[in-house]
Image (tube, grey):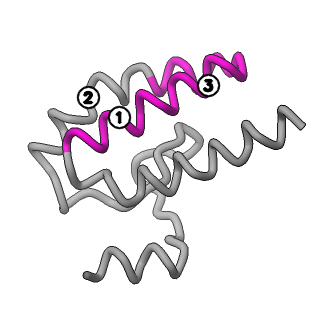
Amino acid sequence: MKQKILQMRGTALQRAHILGQMYPVPHAIAHWEMLKLAWLQRDIKEIHGQFWQTVWAAPLTLLFGRKRLLRDGRVNLDNTQRMSIPDDLLEILKQ
């Protein structure tokens, strides 16, 4: 049960990241929350990656903003990989 809740939380955070990554504060908050989730899961790779993404989220968003690739925020993809965006989120992003 706990694992299912953590998985659902992770999915919600990835979706929040997709929607907020073009704005400095929501982007940084999404990574902070992902860092806390990684800590709960004791995922060392994710903790390390989310720490640095949390630190750099706001400054890099200010520099690059909408020019960045849409990503889910996890450290499982390198910076050159694209990901598919769920259709419901694409509709929101088009507005």
Mark 3: amino acid: Ala
Residue 13 in percent (x, y) is at 52, 46
Element type at mark 3: helix
Q: Is residue 9 left or right of residue 20?
A: right
Residue 31 in percent (x, y) is at 41, 34
Above or below, 35 relative to 95: above
- Mark 3 vs mark 1, foreground winner is 1
Mark 1: amino acid: Ile
Above or below, 2 relative to 72: above
Q: Which residue is mark 3?
A: 38
Q: Are marks 3 and 2 in contact (CB under 8 Å)?
A: no
Looking at the image, tell me whether mark 3 or mark 1 is earlier in sequence order: 1
Residue 32 in percent (x, y) is at 41, 27
Rendered-image quadrant of the C terminus: bottom left
Rendered-image quadrant of the N terminus: top right
Element type at mark 1: helix
Above or below, 44 relative to 66: above
- Mark 1 vs mark 2, foreground winner is 1
Identified at 67% across, 19% down, the residue is 40
Magenta-highlighted residues: 24-50
Looking at the image, tell me whether mark 3 or mark 2 is earlier in sequence order: 3
Q: Which residue is mark 2?
A: 56
Q: Are marks 1 and 2 in contact (CB under 8 Å)?
A: no
* Label ID, residue 29: 1
Task: Specify few, some or many for label 2: CA neighbours under 10 Å numbering under 14, 14-19, or 20 or more.
Answer: some
